[in-house]
Amino acid sequence: MAGDDDPREYLELSLKYLEAAKKNFNDGLHEPALANSIHALELGIKALLLSKIEGPIITHNVGGLFGKHHREELGEATCRRVNRILVRYNIPRYPGMDDHPPEEIGETIEFVDELVRSRIGGILQRDPI
């Protein structure tokens, strides 16, 4: 492992926020669902980055680093979508910032779930820390 931060702990916490996002969404709490899914994405990306680079990573804006280190493996479209999601970090946290239709929030949660569980989780299993 490159730094003192443990990628596995970031991944575990990411999955907790992802589960909270799903529960919030199913309960009709769309803003908390979106906020939790964005945070789950951020933590999942940090888990992956910490397996490759020295930490700590103290910014929420990890999309550029993600693309720099994983664009070739995960693709340009995935990196673009990650950045589009992460730039909305503050939007669901404050009133009147933006309205997102529930379908869009559901699609975001599904994307984050697939990326964090399958792709990031798979990379971390394949490339032991």
Image (cartoon, rainbow, N blue to C red):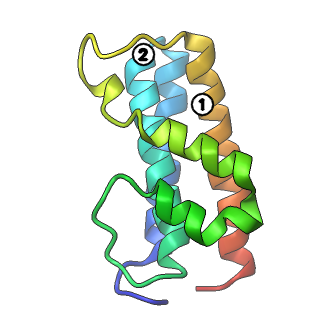
- Residue drawn 54% across and 10% down? 101
Rendered-image quadrant of the C terminus: bottom right
Determine whether 35 is above or below 74 in the image: above
Q: Are marks 2 and 1 in contact (CB under 8 Å)?
A: no
Determine whether 41 is above or below 110 in the image: below
Asked if residue 11 shows in the view, the reply is no
Determine whether 19 is above or below 7 in the image: above
Q: Is residue 56 left or right of residue 107?
A: left
Q: Is residue 90 left or right of residue 48?
A: left
Q: Which residue is mark 1?
A: 108
Instruction: Looking at the picture, tell me which residue is in the foreground, 46 or 7.
Output: 46
Amino acid type at image mark 1: Thr
**Dot 1: element:** helix
Please state the horizontal and vertical placement of residue 99, each as a whole percent of the image.
42, 10
Please state the horizontal and vertical placement of residue 12, each as a whole percent of the image.
49, 60
Q: CA distance from mark 2 to mark 1?
A: 14 Å
Amino acid type at image mark 2: Leu
- Residue drawn 75% across and 56% down? 75
Please state the horizontal and vertical placement of residue 104, each as a whole percent of the image.
60, 19
Q: Residues within 10 Å of mark 1 (few under 14, many from 20)?
A: many
**Dot 2: element:** loop
- Residue drawn 72% across and 58% down? 119
- Residue drawn 45% across and 17% down? 30
Determine whether 106 is above or below 77 in the image: above
Q: Is residue 108 left or right of residue 95?
A: right
Asked if residue 119 shows in the view, the reply is yes
Please state the horizontal and vertical placement of residue 84, each as a whole percent of the image.
53, 37
Q: Residues within 10 Å of mark 2 (few under 14, many from 20)?
A: some
- Residue 29's disc is 2
